[in-house]
Image (cartoon, rainbow, N blue to C red):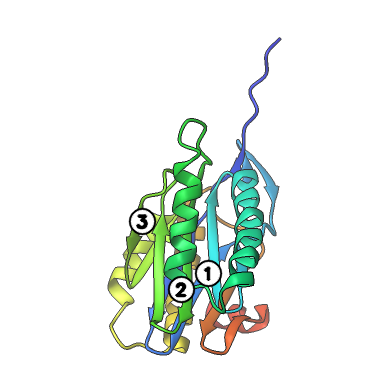
Amino acid sequence: MEQSIEQKKGTTTVGIIAADGVVLASETKATLGYLVSSKEAKKVFKVDDRIALTISGGVGDAQQLVRILKAEINLYKLEREEITVNAVTTLLSNILQSSRIFPLLTMLVVGGADKKGYHLFNIDPLGGITEDRYTSTGSGSPIAFGVLEQGFREGMTKDEAVKLAVQSIKSARERDIFSGGKKIDVAVIDNNGVRFLEHEKIEGLMK
């Protein structure tokens, strides 16, 4: 008897560009059909000194893509001093384009800092790229976008962007059945590197 295998999926991730950095955030619930397979799934990854990304969609596909990307970045940096956010995004797009027949079922938000400034890109499963000041992916993204549209403004600080990101994820967790988990993960990226916020601070922002 043939059985179908469902991938772990369901997510809300958010990315915001502030005046002094980039903020990436996600909730931590992973689902397998109607089963909550994990309440502490990691969806925000540091891939270089000043570049990070969020994953949504199939967890296995996304994790494989992160492993490939880290290896490719290391090879790239053996010949060059620094890799730009745009170069990382293009590399991801090329990998996804090459997998079109059997696509890697994941959407990515790439954020980071380089010599050209702060950048935020959204990449779809077939390698399509969009760049924006704020974005969201995953099943809870329509809810998160409602909060982002209302709260985002040009020139906001990192602290303001963190608060907005947390509030958008919180709203999605409350309304999207595939978003949830025990906590919210937040990464702040600036010229000093990638820093993950303590969960005690994040909990305070949710009140």
Mark 2 or mark 1: whose residue is earlier in sequence: 1
Tag 3, which secondary structure?
strand
Towards the viewer: 158 or 168: 158
Residue drawn 64% across the image and 62% down it: 70
Say which amino acid is labelled 2.
Ala
State the image quarter where residue 153 is shown: bottom left
Residue 25 numbered tag: 1
Say which amino acid is labelled 3.
Ile
Residue 44 drawn at (x, y percent): 59, 65
Residue drawn 36% across the image and 70% down it: 134
Tag 1, which secondary structure?
strand
The answer to whether the residue labelled 2 contacts the one labelled 1, judged by CB atoms less than 8 Å apart, is yes
For the residues marked 1 and 3, what is the alpha-carbon distance in whole angstroms? 19 Å
Q: Quadrant of the N terminus?
A: top right
Tag 2, which secondary structure?
helix
Residue drawn 29% across the image and 69% down it: 149
State the image quarter where residue 28 is shown: bottom right
Question: Does 202 appear above or below 97?
Answer: below
For the residues marked 2 and 3, what is the alpha-carbon distance in whole angstroms? 21 Å
Towards the viewer: 114 or 77: 77
Residue 33 drawn at (x, y percent): 60, 36
Q: List the single residue furthest toward the top.
A: 1
- Front of the two marks 1 and 3: 3
Residue 137 drawn at (x, y percent): 43, 56
Would residue 25 be visible to someone looking at this image? yes
Question: Does 30 appear above or below 186?
Answer: above
Residue corresponding to mark 3: 129
Residue corresponding to mark 2: 165
Mark 1 or mark 3: whose residue is earlier in sequence: 1
The answer to whether the residue labelled 1 contacts the one labelled 3, judged by CB atoms less than 8 Å apart, is no
